[in-house]
Image (cartoon, rainbow, N blue to C red):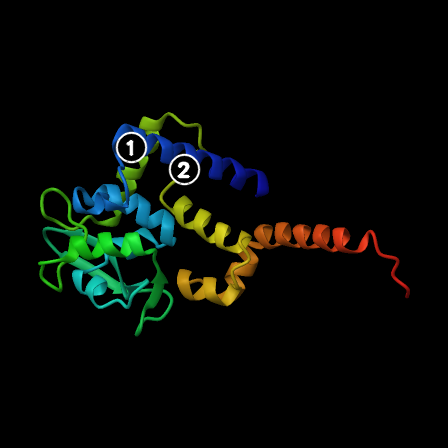
């Protein structure tokens, strides 16, 4: 897992370079010009599921307190026949959750929401229809293919979420806070991301050694 994540993190950094230099992404303000561009940044920055990103509405953005984004539903699918099929988030079906966002991201999101109907989906395809999860996955696959990076077969949108949560764990963010932001239970986080905490313990052991190696402890 450690080696795989190291490769994935390096690959993502190369993807980021490709996205910017190729013009697919320009900055966090890309939301205003093309929603598909900003989605990559928002997904990597918040670790949100693609269904949650697709399910964001204008009201979710405008009603969110400063520094946070309200996540209350998922867009499961959309078709001309059935319309939008939405469901609750996995974290709290009634209240949803609050995801921390940087000020620059929050401003770009508000700019995109400004002047639009409150119940409208925030991210729409160029044909005016919701940018539903399957389209997002195909978009991500096309970017990976265009980048010509060697990534594990089957790498999909979820790598953005997995990498973000791993980075939070590596940074020493309390598990309870990561649980609240990601929508994972603490038990799942500790089971699925134990490789991150193991490396944190390695740093703790090294720090302890550096602290005590010049001392002469008297037991």
Quarter of the image with the C terminus in it: bottom right
Q: Mark 1–mark 2 contact, CB under 8 Å?
A: no
Task: Classify mark 2: helix, strand or loop.
Answer: loop
Residue 71 in picture, x, y percent from top left: 29, 63
Q: Spot the residue most to the right.
A: 218
Residue sitting at x 70%, y 53%: 207
Question: Which is in the foreground here, disc 1 or disc 2?
Answer: 1
Residue 68's spot in the image, x, y percent? 32, 63
Left or right position of 120 against 17: left
Q: Nearer the viewer, residue 83 or 19?
A: 19
Is 119 placed above or below 211 here?
below
Q: Which mark is residue 154?
A: 2
Q: Label 1 to label 2, Cα distance in Å?
A: 13 Å
Residue 37, how many percent across, how many down? 24, 41
Q: In the drawing, what numbered circle is on residue 31?
A: none
Q: Earlier in the sequence, mark 1 or mark 2?
A: 1
């Amino acid at each position: 897992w450690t080696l795989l994540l190291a490769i994935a993190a390096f690959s993502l950094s190369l993807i980021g370079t490709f996205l910017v230099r190729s013009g697919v992404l320009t900055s966090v303000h890309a939301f205003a010009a093309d929603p598909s561009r900003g989605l990559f940044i928002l997904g990597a920055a918040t670790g949100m599921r693609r269904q949650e990103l697709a399910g964001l509405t204008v009201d979710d953005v405008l009603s969110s307190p400063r520094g946070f984004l309200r996540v209350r539903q998922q867009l499961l699918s959309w078709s001309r026949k059935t319309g939008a099929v939405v469901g609750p988030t996995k974290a709290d079906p009634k209240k949803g959750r609050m995801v921390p966002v940087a000020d620059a991201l929050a401003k770009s999101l508000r700019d995109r929401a400004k002047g639009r109907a409150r119940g409208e989906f925030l991210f729409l395809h160029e044909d005016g229809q919701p940018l539903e999860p399957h389209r997002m996955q195909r978009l991500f696959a096309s970017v990976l293919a265009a980048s010509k990076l060697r990534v594990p077969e089957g790498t999909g949108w979820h790598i953005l979420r997995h990498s973000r949560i791993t980075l939070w764990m590596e940074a020493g963010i309390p598990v309870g806070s990561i649980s609240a932001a990601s929508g994972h239970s603490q038990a799942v986080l500790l089971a699925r991301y134990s490789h991150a905490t193991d490396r944190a313990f390695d740093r703790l052991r090294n720090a302890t050694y550096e602290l005590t190696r010049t001392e002469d402890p008297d037991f």
